[in-house]
Structures are given as C-alpha cells and as structure tokens.
C-alpha cells in the first residue's frame, strides 16, 4: 500500500520522506533538546542514522505499516520536523501518532497545524478507528498539543521507557473516530 500523499496547511507542507532529506534530518534531529524529549531519538545522533531511518520509513510505507511525513515550512520548504502514523494495526483499526519539531518552532502552533491533516488522513484515508500517542511525563508540551487537538489522556505507563540511564513514566493519549468530528 504505497501512498505518496502530500498534505498542505496554511504554513506547512507535509510530504513523504526521501533520501534527499538525509542532511536536513541529520542536522535537525541531532539537537540534544529534541533527543531529550523523544523516546527513540539518540544523542549524539550517529553519522548514517538519518539515512538508515529514512530507508526504514520507506520500507514501512511500502508495506503499509507506517506513513511518515517530513514537515516543511512554506514558502521556502525548509525541513522542520517529522510526523508519522506508525505501527498500523489493520485488524483493530488503530495506529500510533508520533511527532517532533525543530526547537526554534516550539510554542508557535506549527505542530497543531500539522496534526490536523494527519488526523484526517488517519481516519479518512487509512480508515482507522483509533489514533494513540505517547509522551514522557516530563515533556508536558506534547501533552498540551495532544489535548488541544482533541486527544484524551488515557493513563500513565509507569517506567515505560529507559532513556539515558533513567526509567521514564509515559502518558498515553488517544482519539477515536467518534471523537474526531
């Protein structure tokens, strides 16, 4: 199920990742503040990791298991982050929403702007019933973005992840198709 959708908002273009994104991804995701708030981004970001990540995402897209979008700012098309629907479970019509944004854009409404077309893509194009998302408890900004966009906090998963030598609590949020409209 290969989908090459491009989604646009007033300030953003959400488009499939390509190998041309390697230098931008390597640079932007290499910022320690991004790795600090993301469960699975390492720091320092190893050489070659951006290319490996993009290759995995292309394979996941081709298999229909994930849809990963680069977030570009309009009009200059500057790479600014990633938003994805991953771990698609067709049997139960659910998937995980994951996202991160370049630190200089935090707090300016860009992620809320990116999430809206992704939610629509998940429910309309992928025919999902449930989208869920995780964030570390010590990263309340992600929780605010999820709440602002209609997600409901379902609980706290105690010591769910191990990040930089510490077990971290993680909040889980979800939106059902019936909640969406």
Image (spheres, rainbow, N blue to C red):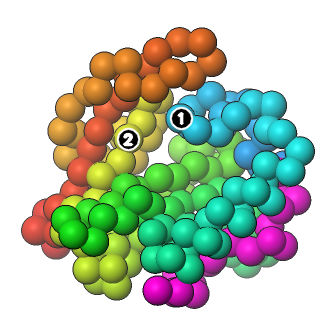
Tell whether label 2 touches label 1 (CB within 8 Å): yes
Q: Along the line of sight, which residue is nearer the eye, 68 or 110?
A: 68
x, y (%) of residue 115? 43, 63
Identify the secondary structure beneath mark 2.
Answer: strand
Looking at the image, is 98 positioned above or below residue 38? Answer: below
- The residue depicted at 31 percent of the width and 19 percent of the height is 158
Q: Along the line of sight, which residue is nearer the eye, 10 or 143?
A: 143
Which residue range is magenta in the image? 1-26
Q: Residue furthest top?
A: 166
> Does residue 19 belong to the magenta stretch?
yes
Dividing the picture into quadrants, the one containing residue 15 is bottom right
Dividing the picture into quadrants, the one containing residue 154 is top left
Separation (CA) of disc 1 from disc 2: 9 Å
Disc 2: which residue: 134
Disc 1: which residue: 39
Q: Is residue 121 left or right of residue 28?
A: left
Residue 17 visible, this orientation: yes
Among numbered discs 1 and 2, the one appearing first in the sequence: 1
The quarter of the image holding the C terminus is bottom left
Q: Along the line of sight, which residue is nearer the eye, 36 or 148?
A: 36
- The residue depicted at 22 percent of the width and 57 percent of the height is 175
- The residue depicted at 89 percent of the width and 45 percent of the height is 47
- The residue depicted at 10 percent of the width and 68 percent of the height is 178
The label on residue 114 is none
x, y (%) of residue 44? 80, 31
Q: Is residue 82 left or right of residue 42?
A: left
x, y (%) of residue 100? 57, 49
């Amino acid at each position: 199920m290969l989908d090459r959708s491009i989604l646009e908002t007033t300030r953003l273009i959400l488009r499939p990742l390509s190998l041309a994104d390697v230098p931008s991804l390597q640079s932007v995701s290499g910022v320690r503040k991004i790795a600090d708030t993301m469960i699975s981004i390492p720091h320092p970001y190893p050489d070659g990791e951006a290319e490996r990540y993009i290759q995995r995402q292309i394979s996941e897209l081709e298999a229909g298991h994930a849809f990963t979008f680069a977030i570009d700012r309009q009009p200059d098309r500057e790479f600014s982050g990633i938003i994805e629907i991953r771990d698609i479970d067709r049997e139960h019509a659910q998937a995980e929403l994951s996202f991160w944004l370049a630190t200089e854009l935090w707090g300016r409404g860009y992620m809320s702007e990116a999430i809206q077309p992704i939610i629509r893509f998940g429910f309309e194009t992928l025919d999902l019933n449930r989208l869920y998302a995780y964030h570390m408890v010590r990263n309340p900004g992600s929780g605010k973005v999820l709440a602002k966009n209609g997600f409901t906090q379902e609980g706290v998963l105690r010591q769910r992840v191990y990040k930089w030598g510490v077990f971290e609590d993680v909040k889980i949020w979800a939106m059902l198709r019936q909640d969406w409209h």
